[in-house]
Image (cartoon, rainbow, N blue to C red):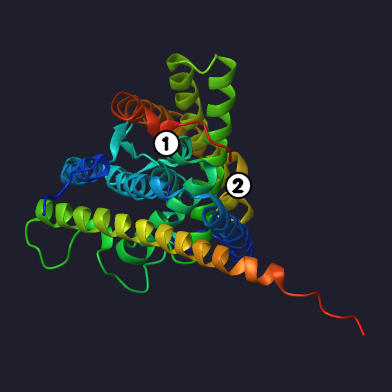
Amino acid sequence: MRLKVKWWHVALLLSVLVALLSPLASGSPDGLEKVAEDKGFIKQAKNPPFELIADYVFPGVENEAAATILAGIVGTLLIFGLTYGVARLLRAKRSRDQERSPVRESRPPLSSG
Amino acid sequence: MHIPDGFLSTATIATTFAVSAGGVACAVGVANKKLEDKRIPLLGVTAAFIFAAQMLNFPVAGGTSGHLLGSTLAAILLGPWMAVLIMACVLMVQCLLFQDGGLLALGANVLNMGVIASFVGYYLYQGISSLMGRDRRGMMVGAFVGAWSGVFLAASACAAELWVSGTSPFSVVFPAMAGWHALIGIGEGLITVTVLSLVLAARRDLLQPQKV
Protein backbone atom coordinates (compact mmCIF):
# COMPACT_ATOMS: atom_id res chain seq x y z
CA MET A 1 0.00 0.00 0.00
CA ARG A 2 1.41 3.37 -0.97
CA LEU A 3 0.94 6.34 1.26
CA LYS A 4 -0.29 9.30 -0.76
CA VAL A 5 1.09 12.56 0.59
CA LYS A 6 -1.58 15.23 0.67
CA TRP A 7 -1.10 18.99 0.96
CA TRP A 8 -2.27 19.05 4.54
CA HIS A 9 0.30 16.46 5.60
CA VAL A 10 2.92 18.95 4.44
CA ALA A 11 1.10 21.83 6.19
CA LEU A 12 0.93 19.86 9.44
CA LEU A 13 4.63 19.07 9.17
CA LEU A 14 5.34 22.79 8.66
CA SER A 15 3.34 23.57 11.82
CA VAL A 16 5.41 21.05 13.78
CA LEU A 17 8.56 22.71 12.36
CA VAL A 18 7.25 26.05 13.66
CA ALA A 19 6.91 24.40 17.10
CA LEU A 20 10.58 23.36 16.85
CA LEU A 21 11.50 27.05 16.77
CA SER A 22 9.75 27.70 20.10
CA PRO A 23 12.96 27.91 22.21
CA LEU A 24 13.86 30.98 20.12
CA ALA A 25 10.76 32.84 21.34
CA SER A 26 11.25 36.10 23.22
CA GLY A 27 11.07 35.58 26.96
CA SER A 28 9.90 39.15 27.59
CA PRO A 29 6.44 39.63 29.13
CA ASP A 30 3.64 39.89 26.56
CA GLY A 31 1.48 42.99 26.20
CA LEU A 32 -0.99 42.17 28.99
CA GLU A 33 1.73 40.95 31.39
CA LYS A 34 3.73 44.12 30.76
CA VAL A 35 0.71 46.32 31.48
CA ALA A 36 -0.07 44.31 34.63
CA GLU A 37 3.54 44.74 35.82
CA ASP A 38 3.70 48.46 35.01
CA LYS A 39 0.29 49.26 36.47
CA GLY A 40 0.83 47.14 39.56
CA PHE A 41 -1.92 44.52 39.31
CA ILE A 42 0.27 41.54 38.32
CA LYS A 43 0.31 40.44 42.00
CA GLN A 44 -3.43 39.77 41.78
CA ALA A 45 -2.77 36.86 39.39
CA LYS A 46 -3.56 33.53 41.05
CA ASN A 47 -1.59 30.36 40.54
CA PRO A 48 -3.48 27.71 38.60
CA PRO A 49 -5.08 24.96 40.75
CA PHE A 50 -3.08 22.29 38.91
CA GLU A 51 -0.11 22.20 36.55
CA LEU A 52 0.38 19.80 33.65
CA ILE A 53 2.76 21.32 31.08
CA ALA A 54 2.90 24.74 32.75
CA ASP A 55 4.64 27.53 30.79
CA TYR A 56 5.08 25.20 27.81
CA VAL A 57 7.89 23.31 29.53
CA PHE A 58 7.42 19.54 29.42
CA PRO A 59 7.95 18.22 32.96
CA GLY A 60 10.79 15.81 33.67
CA VAL A 61 12.97 16.94 30.76
CA GLU A 62 16.17 18.53 32.04
CA ASN A 63 17.16 20.52 28.97
CA GLU A 64 14.77 23.48 28.83
CA ALA A 65 14.94 23.92 25.06
CA ALA A 66 14.12 20.23 24.58
CA ALA A 67 11.29 20.47 27.12
CA THR A 68 9.82 23.46 25.26
CA ILE A 69 10.10 21.75 21.87
CA LEU A 70 8.47 18.60 23.25
CA ALA A 71 5.62 20.67 24.73
CA GLY A 72 5.23 22.43 21.37
CA ILE A 73 5.05 19.19 19.37
CA VAL A 74 2.62 17.57 21.82
CA GLY A 75 0.39 20.66 21.76
CA THR A 76 0.47 21.08 17.99
CA LEU A 77 -0.45 17.44 17.29
CA LEU A 78 -3.04 17.40 20.07
CA ILE A 79 -4.73 20.54 18.70
CA PHE A 80 -4.76 19.02 15.21
CA GLY A 81 -6.31 15.80 16.53
CA LEU A 82 -8.86 17.65 18.65
CA THR A 83 -10.10 20.05 15.97
CA TYR A 84 -10.04 17.39 13.22
CA GLY A 85 -11.93 15.01 15.50
CA VAL A 86 -14.53 17.61 16.54
CA ALA A 87 -15.11 18.57 12.90
CA ARG A 88 -15.49 14.91 11.87
CA LEU A 89 -17.95 14.27 14.70
CA LEU A 90 -20.06 17.28 13.73
CA ARG A 91 -19.99 16.13 10.09
CA ALA A 92 -21.03 12.59 11.09
CA LYS A 93 -23.88 13.98 13.17
CA ARG A 94 -25.14 15.95 10.16
CA SER A 95 -25.12 12.80 8.01
CA ARG A 96 -27.16 10.95 10.64
CA ASP A 97 -29.61 13.85 10.95
CA GLN A 98 -30.08 13.94 7.19
CA GLU A 99 -30.76 10.19 7.06
CA ARG A 100 -33.34 10.51 9.76
CA SER A 101 -35.14 13.65 8.62
CA PRO A 102 -37.12 12.24 5.60
CA VAL A 103 -38.67 9.64 7.93
CA ARG A 104 -39.69 12.36 10.34
CA GLU A 105 -41.27 14.46 7.60
CA SER A 106 -43.32 11.58 6.19
CA ARG A 107 -44.90 10.88 9.56
CA PRO A 108 -48.62 11.79 9.55
CA PRO A 109 -49.51 14.93 11.53
CA LEU A 110 -50.79 14.36 15.02
CA SER A 111 -54.54 14.57 15.28
CA SER A 112 -55.69 17.45 17.39
CA GLY A 113 -58.62 15.54 18.92
CA MET B 1 -3.13 38.47 25.96
CA HIS B 2 -4.22 35.41 27.93
CA ILE B 3 -5.88 36.72 31.10
CA PRO B 4 -4.87 34.71 34.20
CA ASP B 5 -7.23 34.05 37.09
CA GLY B 6 -7.43 36.78 39.70
CA PHE B 7 -7.81 39.74 37.32
CA LEU B 8 -11.57 39.54 36.68
CA SER B 9 -14.59 40.03 38.93
CA THR B 10 -17.26 37.36 39.30
CA ALA B 11 -19.74 39.39 37.26
CA THR B 12 -17.24 39.79 34.41
CA ILE B 13 -16.40 36.09 34.51
CA ALA B 14 -20.08 35.13 34.35
CA THR B 15 -20.95 37.59 31.57
CA THR B 16 -17.99 36.72 29.36
CA PHE B 17 -18.59 32.98 29.85
CA ALA B 18 -22.23 33.38 28.83
CA VAL B 19 -21.38 35.37 25.67
CA SER B 20 -18.55 33.02 24.69
CA ALA B 21 -20.65 29.92 25.29
CA GLY B 22 -23.32 31.40 23.01
CA GLY B 23 -20.70 32.15 20.37
CA VAL B 24 -19.21 28.66 20.51
CA ALA B 25 -22.68 27.09 20.37
CA CYS B 26 -23.43 29.11 17.20
CA ALA B 27 -20.07 28.06 15.74
CA VAL B 28 -20.86 24.39 16.44
CA GLY B 29 -24.25 24.88 14.77
CA VAL B 30 -22.67 26.44 11.68
CA ALA B 31 -20.08 23.65 11.48
CA ASN B 32 -22.81 21.06 11.87
CA LYS B 33 -24.79 22.60 8.99
CA LYS B 34 -22.20 23.85 6.55
CA LEU B 35 -18.70 22.51 7.12
CA GLU B 36 -17.62 20.62 4.02
CA ASP B 37 -15.65 17.39 4.22
CA LYS B 38 -12.79 18.73 2.18
CA ARG B 39 -12.28 21.68 4.53
CA ILE B 40 -11.88 19.55 7.67
CA PRO B 41 -8.12 18.95 7.19
CA LEU B 42 -7.67 22.70 6.60
CA LEU B 43 -9.49 23.38 9.86
CA GLY B 44 -7.22 21.01 11.79
CA VAL B 45 -4.02 22.26 10.21
CA THR B 46 -4.96 25.93 10.74
CA ALA B 47 -5.60 25.24 14.44
CA ALA B 48 -2.30 23.35 14.76
CA PHE B 49 -0.39 26.15 13.05
CA ILE B 50 -2.01 28.80 15.27
CA PHE B 51 -1.04 26.88 18.42
CA ALA B 52 2.57 26.47 17.27
CA ALA B 53 2.86 30.08 16.11
CA GLN B 54 1.40 31.39 19.39
CA MET B 55 4.41 29.88 21.19
CA LEU B 56 6.76 32.08 19.17
CA ASN B 57 6.73 35.38 21.04
CA PHE B 58 8.37 38.11 19.00
CA PRO B 59 10.00 41.09 20.70
CA VAL B 60 8.43 44.52 20.36
CA ALA B 61 9.80 47.73 21.90
CA GLY B 62 10.67 48.27 25.55
CA GLY B 63 11.20 44.74 26.84
CA THR B 64 7.79 43.53 25.77
CA SER B 65 6.82 40.71 23.45
CA GLY B 66 3.78 39.74 21.47
CA HIS B 67 2.56 36.65 19.69
CA LEU B 68 0.21 35.82 16.88
CA LEU B 69 -3.46 35.40 17.77
CA GLY B 70 -4.31 33.89 14.40
CA SER B 71 -8.03 34.69 14.56
CA THR B 72 -8.04 36.80 11.38
CA LEU B 73 -5.95 34.22 9.51
CA ALA B 74 -8.38 31.45 10.50
CA ALA B 75 -11.38 33.63 9.60
CA ILE B 76 -9.99 34.46 6.14
CA LEU B 77 -9.32 30.77 5.42
CA LEU B 78 -12.44 29.25 6.95
CA GLY B 79 -14.93 32.00 7.82
CA PRO B 80 -15.50 33.71 11.18
CA TRP B 81 -17.54 30.95 12.81
CA MET B 82 -14.96 28.27 12.11
CA ALA B 83 -12.34 30.73 13.45
CA VAL B 84 -14.33 30.94 16.69
CA LEU B 85 -14.38 27.14 16.89
CA ILE B 86 -10.62 26.91 16.24
CA MET B 87 -9.72 29.64 18.74
CA ALA B 88 -11.97 28.11 21.41
CA CYS B 89 -10.21 24.73 20.99
CA VAL B 90 -6.74 26.32 21.08
CA LEU B 91 -7.53 28.49 24.12
CA MET B 92 -9.13 25.57 25.97
CA VAL B 93 -6.07 23.34 25.48
CA GLN B 94 -3.72 26.21 26.40
CA CYS B 95 -5.72 26.78 29.59
CA LEU B 96 -6.21 23.14 30.66
CA LEU B 97 -2.90 21.60 29.59
CA PHE B 98 -0.40 24.47 29.50
CA GLN B 99 -1.77 26.74 32.26
CA ASP B 100 -1.75 29.68 29.84
CA GLY B 101 -4.83 31.75 30.66
CA GLY B 102 -6.93 31.14 33.78
CA LEU B 103 -9.69 28.55 34.05
CA LEU B 104 -12.23 31.15 35.18
CA ALA B 105 -10.92 33.67 32.64
CA LEU B 106 -11.40 31.23 29.75
CA GLY B 107 -14.72 32.83 28.81
CA ALA B 108 -13.13 36.28 28.56
CA ASN B 109 -10.16 34.93 26.60
CA VAL B 110 -12.45 33.15 24.12
CA LEU B 111 -14.55 36.31 23.80
CA ASN B 112 -11.54 38.60 23.16
CA MET B 113 -9.22 36.45 21.08
CA GLY B 114 -11.84 34.12 19.59
CA VAL B 115 -15.12 35.93 18.96
CA ILE B 116 -14.12 39.62 18.77
CA ALA B 117 -10.80 39.21 16.92
CA SER B 118 -12.27 36.72 14.40
CA PHE B 119 -15.29 38.82 13.44
CA VAL B 120 -13.45 42.16 13.36
CA GLY B 121 -10.66 40.64 11.28
CA TYR B 122 -13.04 38.85 8.93
CA TYR B 123 -15.34 41.77 8.13
CA LEU B 124 -12.52 44.27 7.66
CA TYR B 125 -10.75 41.79 5.37
CA GLN B 126 -13.93 41.19 3.36
CA GLY B 127 -14.83 44.90 3.22
CA ILE B 128 -11.41 46.16 2.21
CA SER B 129 -10.58 43.39 -0.26
CA SER B 130 -13.93 43.79 -2.04
CA LEU B 131 -13.57 47.61 -2.14
CA MET B 132 -10.15 47.15 -3.73
CA GLY B 133 -11.48 44.79 -6.36
CA ARG B 134 -10.62 41.41 -4.81
CA ASP B 135 -7.19 41.36 -6.39
CA ARG B 136 -4.07 40.14 -4.63
CA ARG B 137 -3.17 43.59 -3.35
CA GLY B 138 -6.65 44.15 -1.94
CA MET B 139 -6.56 40.81 -0.15
CA MET B 140 -3.20 41.58 1.42
CA VAL B 141 -4.20 45.09 2.54
CA GLY B 142 -7.46 43.70 3.91
CA ALA B 143 -5.66 40.90 5.74
CA PHE B 144 -3.16 43.31 7.31
CA VAL B 145 -5.77 45.84 8.44
CA GLY B 146 -8.11 43.07 9.62
CA ALA B 147 -5.38 41.32 11.61
CA TRP B 148 -4.13 44.57 13.19
CA SER B 149 -7.66 45.68 14.12
CA GLY B 150 -8.54 42.24 15.50
CA VAL B 151 -5.61 42.42 17.93
CA PHE B 152 -6.31 46.05 18.78
CA LEU B 153 -9.99 45.48 19.56
CA ALA B 154 -9.31 42.24 21.45
CA ALA B 155 -6.86 44.20 23.61
CA SER B 156 -9.41 47.00 24.05
CA ALA B 157 -12.03 44.46 25.15
CA CYS B 158 -9.50 42.98 27.57
CA ALA B 159 -8.83 46.48 28.98
CA ALA B 160 -12.57 47.06 29.37
CA GLU B 161 -12.95 43.76 31.26
CA LEU B 162 -10.09 44.70 33.61
CA TRP B 163 -11.71 48.10 34.13
CA VAL B 164 -15.23 46.87 34.90
CA SER B 165 -13.70 44.25 37.20
CA GLY B 166 -12.15 47.09 39.22
CA THR B 167 -8.63 45.79 38.58
CA SER B 168 -7.33 49.00 37.00
CA PRO B 169 -8.90 52.39 36.16
CA PHE B 170 -9.96 52.88 32.53
CA SER B 171 -7.67 55.88 32.04
CA VAL B 172 -4.71 53.73 33.11
CA VAL B 173 -5.36 50.32 31.60
CA PHE B 174 -6.91 51.35 28.28
CA PRO B 175 -4.07 53.51 26.88
CA ALA B 176 -1.48 50.97 28.07
CA MET B 177 -3.22 47.96 26.49
CA ALA B 178 -4.09 49.87 23.31
CA GLY B 179 -0.54 51.24 22.97
CA TRP B 180 1.29 47.93 23.30
CA HIS B 181 -1.17 46.07 21.12
CA ALA B 182 -1.03 48.71 18.39
CA LEU B 183 2.61 47.56 18.08
CA ILE B 184 1.91 43.84 18.53
CA GLY B 185 -0.83 44.14 15.89
CA ILE B 186 1.82 45.04 13.29
CA GLY B 187 3.42 41.63 13.92
CA GLU B 188 0.01 39.98 13.63
CA GLY B 189 -0.57 41.77 10.32
CA LEU B 190 2.82 40.79 8.89
CA ILE B 191 2.47 37.11 9.87
CA THR B 192 -1.11 36.96 8.56
CA VAL B 193 -0.09 38.48 5.20
CA THR B 194 2.93 36.13 4.92
CA VAL B 195 0.94 32.98 5.61
CA LEU B 196 -1.86 34.13 3.31
CA SER B 197 0.64 34.70 0.47
CA LEU B 198 2.03 31.20 1.04
CA VAL B 199 -1.46 29.70 0.88
CA LEU B 200 -2.22 31.70 -2.29
CA ALA B 201 1.01 30.52 -3.91
CA ALA B 202 0.58 26.87 -2.94
CA ARG B 203 -3.17 26.21 -2.88
CA ARG B 204 -5.23 29.11 -4.18
CA ASP B 205 -8.29 26.83 -4.36
CA LEU B 206 -8.42 26.66 -0.54
CA LEU B 207 -9.42 30.31 -0.52
CA GLN B 208 -12.63 30.09 -2.47
CA PRO B 209 -15.11 32.81 -1.64
CA GLN B 210 -17.65 31.44 0.77
CA LYS B 211 -20.66 32.62 2.67
CA VAL B 212 -20.53 33.03 6.42
Residue A7 to residue A65: above or below: above
Of A61 and A93, the residue lying toward us: A93
Of B106 and B159, the residue lying toward us: B106
Q: Answer yes or no: is residue B105 visible.
A: no
- Which residue is found at the position 44% from the left and 66% from the top? B103
Q: x%, y% of residue A68?
A: 17, 54
Q: Which residue is mark 2?
A: B160
Is residue A27 found left or right of B148 in the rendered image? left
Of A69 and B122, the residue lying toward us: B122
User: Which residue sits furthest right?
Assistant: A113
Q: Nearer the viewer, mark 2 or mark 1?
A: 1
Q: x%, y% of residue B166?
A: 60, 56
Judged from the image, the secondary structure of the residue bearing numbered disc 1 is helix
Judged from the image, the secondary structure of the residue bearing numbered disc 2 is helix
Is residue B195 found left or right of A15 in the rendered image? right
Residue A6 to residue B145: above or below: below
Which mark identifies residue A109? Answer: none
Q: Chain of mark 2?
A: B
- State which quarter of the image contains the C terminus of chain A: bottom right
Q: Quadrant of residue B89?
A: bottom left
Q: Chain of mark 1?
A: B
Query: Which mark is first along the chain, 1 or 2?
Result: 1
Of A90 and B83, the residue lying toward us: A90
Q: x%, y% of residue B61?
A: 34, 29
Q: In 3D space, how far apart are the residues under numbered discs 2 and 1 (Cα atoms)?
A: 25 Å
Which mark identifies residue B73? Answer: 1
The kind of residue tagged 1 is: Leu
- Which residue is found at the position 9% from the left and 63% from the top? A61
The kind of residue tagged 2 is: Ala
